[in-house]
Amino acid sequence: MPPNETTLPALLNRRVFASGAAAGLVSACAKTPDEAFVNVYSARHYEADRKLYDGFEQASGIAVRVLPANAEQLLERLRAEGDATEADLIVAADAGNLWRIQDAKLFQPATSPILEASVPQRLRSPAGHWWGFSKRARVIAYRKDAVEPEEVATMEALAGPRFRGQIVARSSTNTYNLSLLASRIERLGADNARAWVAGVRANFARDPQGADTDQIKALAAGAAQATIVNHYYLLRMAQSPDAAEQEAAARVALCFPDQAGAGAHINISGAGIAKYAKRPEQARQLLEYLVSDQAQNLLAPINVEFPIRPAIAPAPALAALGDFKEEDVPLEAFGRRQAEAARIYEEAGWR
Ligand code: FE2
């Protein structure tokens, strides 16, 4: 997992609660009655999220307490806690991670007219176990001085002879890559996916290593010409206080691939109500808030991801990337096809 989703609990520590300390923090929260809170287990740690939770607190009078963890830790913890958990709402990035929680039977289905009306059908689980509230694209990043944009117009191109020895990639065990391939399997079938993986693997400049940001840095350093990343990593590097990151980002550009075909791969950040939530009603209210006009408009200008609703304008840096066509695959397929995707990567030797 990338650092933003694992190691920035300090950003959220205002109402963070730790194992066994929850009761103490409740009584420490003098302004709200004991029942007027909701616990969020979150694998998504953006500063923007705290602003969202603040907005909910103001609108509802319900305090939001956040337990940060990465996706693996979060699942492990929920499993260990079972019906004793204090988790009410579970937030995670990537439909593949949300599906793992669903598959472990740690979500309960939920729905409401607000949720139904706000979240496009393909961006939520069919039975309401999880609901997207923010969107990301997994796209091609390329070195500007070595690649013409039209050479990376399709994901297919990365598997072709043009990029022999010029591709770097993240490990296939990463959920982002599992979802990317699961989506391809759903759309084009396993044989196509197998051929694509073999082609890209044959083009590797080095064995898969590092996170998305490391792939961008490898391009900037001249180790390769193209890679696959979530769109927000390059934007973050471009806005980094670190001059070296800014310089690296300046050498690299993004291409939203397959614009004449199926569209760019889309994933979500999403949330669902914990199976053993002690405050399911408060959790549902928070979930509804996350996709409400108020929250989406509050989140949009400060978010590194796209709003879940097409009608709401994204942050200026995202809008500057231009409109793009999105792949139209129901995200539940990313879970359904996850094991098959892992097998195909494994067989092709993309570790
Ligand atoms: Fe990420």
Image (cartoon, rainbow, N blue to C red):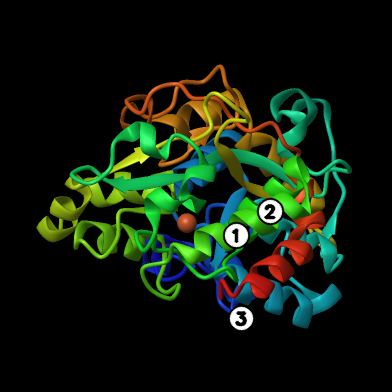
Q: Is residue 247 left or right of residue 17?
A: left
Q: What amino acid does circle 1 point to? A: Val
Residue 90 visible at all: no
Circles 2 and 1: CB atoms closer than 8 Å: yes
Bin the neighbour count of mark 2 within 10 Å (Cα to Cα): few under 14, some 14-19, many 20 and up.
Answer: many
Front residue (pair 66, 309): 309
Q: Give the CA separation, mark 2 to mark 1.
A: 6 Å
Q: Residues within 10 Å of mark 3 (few under 14, many from 20)?
A: few
Query: Which residue is located at x 31 percent, y 32 percent?
Result: 317
Quadrant of the image containing the C terminus: bottom right
Which numbered disc, 3 or 1, marks the residue closer to the eye? 1
Q: What residue did someone put label 3 on?
A: 19
- Asked whether the viewer can see residue 330, the reply is yes
**Residue carrying label 2:** 193
Which circle's residue, 3 or 1, is located before the other in the chain? Answer: 3
Q: Are marks 2 and 3 in contact (CB under 8 Å)?
A: no
Q: How far apart, in angstroms, are the residues tagged by discs 3 and 1?
A: 41 Å
Which residue is tagged 1? Answer: 197
Q: Of all residues shown, which one is farthest toward the top?
A: 311
The span from disc 2 to disc 3 (Cα, nearest Å) is 42 Å
x and y percentages locating residue 327 in the rendered image: 63, 33
Q: Is residue 243 left or right of residue 178?
A: left
